[in-house]
Image: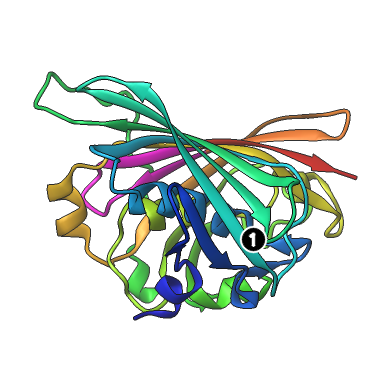
Amino acid sequence: MSTFDEALAVHPDGNGIWRAHADPRCEANTGMFGGWTAAILLKAILADAQHHGEPIAVTTNFISRIIPGDDVTIGTTHLGGGRSLNNWRADLYKTGENEILSSAMVVMASRRESDTFTEWNMPDAPAPDGLEIFHPRGTFGLSVEFRTVSGFPPINQPDTKSLHWIREASGRAHDAVQLVYLADCFPPRVFYMSEAYRPSSSITMSVYLYATADELSRIGGDDILSEVIGTRAEQSTAGAKLRFWSKDGALIATSEQMCWFR
């Protein structure tokens, strides 16, 4: 089992109840990394025997700090749906307490062949193999490899755009849980207008998953391109949009999040 899978392990503890551990290997600067939180909430839903279909939308609200090293409990609830679409909710608590620390809404779909379009085009980027590897700040960064193209270092830049290749460091094959985890792996956009790093934390993050099973199979654990741009910073909130691209130009996921900063 990879370090990634160990850190996201969930164990059944009754109907719709799951036990997990806030693994310090996935710590960020202000508590557990938001990508870990979103990913483990999705993982619990996928572990529920009642689920069917594939996740296509995951919206996570980060309510309170999750302390690294704590044991946590996750409750999953099937909210309803039909043959094609189903809605789920997952809530995370510190074990033995009643306060919800984070909550996710997940849409599952039984996909079928349909008409297609992609409005955006993959930006030009050099191949990742010739680019230097670095790891994001925080212990979670050890499980992630960045190969930067533009917009780094993220301080005092002319705009909030960035481009980098990214993958799980062990080469673990991409799946929905891993894409949700990686969707939070980029510097806060407020850094780009600042002369130094400053406090910032995610409030909410939505991830939309488009990749087909065949596309994920072809990608395996290879690098994917992460394209990020800020939307607006105003009154201590800042937004950002992300697009994930495969090397052959397929748009495999998008994300949008809102952060709080000082």
Residues shaded magenta = 242-255
Give above or below for 21 relative to 152.
Answer: below
On the rendered structure, is 150 left or right of 210?
right
Specify the principal SS of the magenta part.
strand
**Residue under the image location 45 percent in, 50 percent down:** 180
Q: Residue furthest front?
A: 14
Q: In which quarter of the image is the N terminus?
A: bottom left
**Residue under the image location 70 percent in, 49 percent down:** 188
User: Does the segment drawn in magenta span residue 250?
Assistant: yes
Q: How crowded is mark 1: few (under 14 residues within 10 Å), some or many (20 or more)?
A: many
Q: Name the residue under label 1.
A: 33
Q: Can residue 144 be seen in this view?
A: yes
Residue 257: image quadrant is top right
Q: Is mark 1 on a helix, strand or loop?
A: loop
Name the residue nearer the viewer: 50 or 118. 50
Place of residue 23 in the rendered image (x, y in percent of width and height, measured from the top left): 60, 73
Q: Can residue 159 be seen in this view?
A: no
Name the residue nearer the viewer: 253 or 17. 17
On the rendered structure, is 34 left or right of 262?
left
User: Does the segment drawn in magenta span residue 116?
Assistant: no
| Amino acid type shown at disc 1 | Phe
Q: In which quarter of the image is the C terminus?
A: top right
Place of residue 177 in the rendered image (x, y in percent of width and height, measured from the top left): 39, 54
**Residue under the image location 76 percent in, 49 percent down:** 201
Place of residue 211 in the rendered image (x, y in percent of width and height, measured from the top left): 25, 42
Question: How did the renderer colour the structure?
Answer: rainbow
Give above or below for 52 relative to 219.
Answer: above
Name the residue nearer the viewer: 134 or 195. 134
Residue 217: image quadrant is bottom left
**Residue under the image location 71 percent in, 70 percent down:** 68
